[in-house]
Image (cartoon, helix red, strand yellow):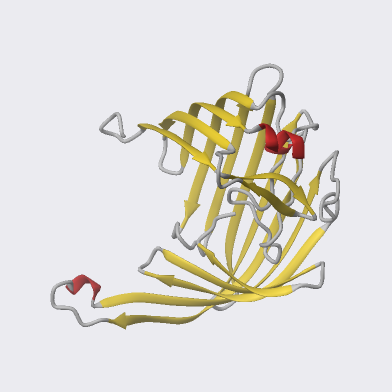
Amino acid sequence: LYLDNQLRWSLNGGFSMGRNREVNYTTRYNKSVPIKNNDKYLRTYRTWFAEVGFRPAIKTKHTFGVSYSYENFADTIFKLNPFFSPGSHIIRSPEITYQLSYNDVDFIPYPKKGYLGEIIIRKKGFNHPLNLWQMTVKGSGTWPVGLNYFVNLRAVGMVKLPLRQSYMTRQFIGNDDHYLQGYEYYVIDGVAGGYTKATLARPICNTHLKIPSKQLKRLNYIPLKIYAKTFADAGYVYSKTPGENQLTNKILYSGGVGLDIVIFTDFVLKIEWSFNRLGENGLYLHKRDYF
């Protein structure tokens, strides 16, 4: 909801509530381990948030947010993992956030030139048992090179303080929008680390799909662009308590080739064949992503 005619100030908010019969209670061998109970709810939650946005210029935006969540977990989860959460099975967590976003690209859904940046600072909880400071920094740059080629470099860094966190606040790669190509089937928990991605791509097809339709003439010609690419990723995630997770506290790397398909000007489908440090390879599908 915009608050002024210049579209500089905006307001956003939401509320959600629900219950789960299945909950991931730990990570073992870099796989989420769930517990399920068909006769009982293992998690009940309620959460709300409110955000105020300020865009002083077209490329930069500041977002200030507050939120509050209430979660109630069954005792069964703590019997399986005593370090699941900081404190009791009822977790009340107020949170404040600040986000600075910068966008200077030629085409937001699939940039071929320009820069993107983001800094997020979170404070979750204010005293014992939950007291988390988190900072996440993201950056992306894309440059044309040679004839029709372009290079994209992306980097993400994150740190959580204090460094000793419970299972609930240790999630990193494999959660939210954080992932490494070639490690899509793994989750890598930690309190500090980052990763980089490098991509070299070029267009191989620029055409339209013709769909006869008298009722929807605007959809008679659907733009279609296909880009061929090769890519390489590298990353590292640190944890004070890695346990049985063999990918934590180790250099991670992967690479591969793929196709990026852009339809309707803003729908992006990524088809990738990736190889990782474990000697595994596979075909993966992704939607549009910035980082």
Question: From this viewpoint, which residue is outermost toward the left?
Answer: 214
Residue 251 position within the rendered picture, expressed as x and y whole percent measured from the top left: 84, 56
Residue 186 position within the rendered picture, expressed as x and y whole percent measured from the top left: 71, 58
Residue at x 80%, y 55% (from the top left corner): 29
> Camera-side residue: 31 or 104?
31
> Camera-side residue: 218 or 29?
29
Residue at x 82%, y 50% (from the top left corner): 248
Q: Would you identify the image quadrant in which residue 211 lies? A: bottom left
- From the viewer's perspective, is 206 left or right of 246? left
- From the viewer's perspective, is 116 left or right of 12? right
Q: Quadrant of the C terminus?
A: bottom right
Note whether 241 is above or below 150 in the view shown: above
Note whether 32 is above or below 271 in the view shown: above
Residue at x 63%, y 71% (from the top left corner): 200
Question: From this viewpoint, which residue is outermost toward the front?
Answer: 39
Note whether 84 is above or below 236 in the view shown: above
The answer to whether residue 136 of the structure is visible from this angle is yes
The answer to whether residue 169 of the structure is visible from this angle is no
Q: Would you identify the image quadrant in which residue 284 lies? A: bottom right
> Camera-side residue: 14 or 289?
14
Residue at x 50%, y 61% (from the top left corner): 288
Residue 232 position within the rendered picture, expressed as x and y whole percent measured from the top left: 71, 67
- From the viewer's perspective, is 70 left or right of 163? left
Total labels: the figure holds 0
Note whether 130 is above or below 140 in the view shown: above
Question: From this viewpoint, which residue is outermost toward the top?
Answer: 127
Q: Quadrant of the N terminus?
A: top left
